[in-house]
Image: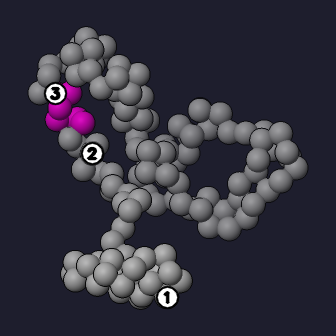
Amino acid sequence: MASPPKTTDWQELLKLTQGEPLVVERVCLAGRDIAIEGAFELPQLAKLSLEDQIFIVAFVRSHGSIKEMEQVFGVSYPTVKARLNRIAQSLTFVDNNPTPSRNEVLERLKRGEITAAEAIKELESLP
């Protein structure tokens, strides 16, 4: 079983792909004799350049303090904001509570999970 990838492995992979889309086809669980094969897309944050990943880690570690980011990176407030905005624009927001479809509402009604009045209200609010 191969050893888990190191940070430098991801850095090299990012350099090789030069921002092109990448699909992982095999995932091995560290320390276990388990491998999963298929087509796996990298998470959004892993697709960022190494410099942007470092910037985001620093931002999280500073608890979102732009003032601290100014000190750490030696740049101005507008520079920090501009970089955060650029990175944010490259990321898509994952809606973990999407609007249900008409069929989903009707199925929930059929299973007795919602009342007829709740179903009507949800159906009326659908686009």
Near-viewer residue (74 or 120) = 120
Helix or strand or loop: what does disc 1 sit on?
A: helix
| Position of residue 37 measured from the top left corner of the image (x, y, whole percent) | 73, 64
| Measured Cα–Cα span from mark 3 to mark 1 | 54 Å
Which numbered disc, 1 or 2, marks the residue closer to the eye? 1
Label 3, label 2: how many angstroms apart (C-alpha)?
A: 14 Å
Secondary element at image label 3: helix
Q: Give whichever of 62, 40 is nearer the camera.
A: 62
Per the rendered image, the range of residues in magenta is: 79-84
Q: What residue is shown at x 23% (from left), y 43% (from top)?
A: 86
Q: Tell me which label, 1 or 2, sits earlier in the chain.
A: 2
- Pointer 2 residue: 88
Depicted 71 relative to depicted 66: above or below:
above
| Quadrant position of residue 36 | bottom right
Residue ID for mark 3: 79
Mark 3 or 1, nearer chain start: 3
For marks 3 and 2 on the same chain, the one whose residue lies earlier in the sequence: 3
Give the residue type that dot 2 points to.
Answer: Ala
User: Please, what is the three-letter code of the amino acid marked with disc 1?
Assistant: Lys
Q: Is residue 80 magenta?
A: yes
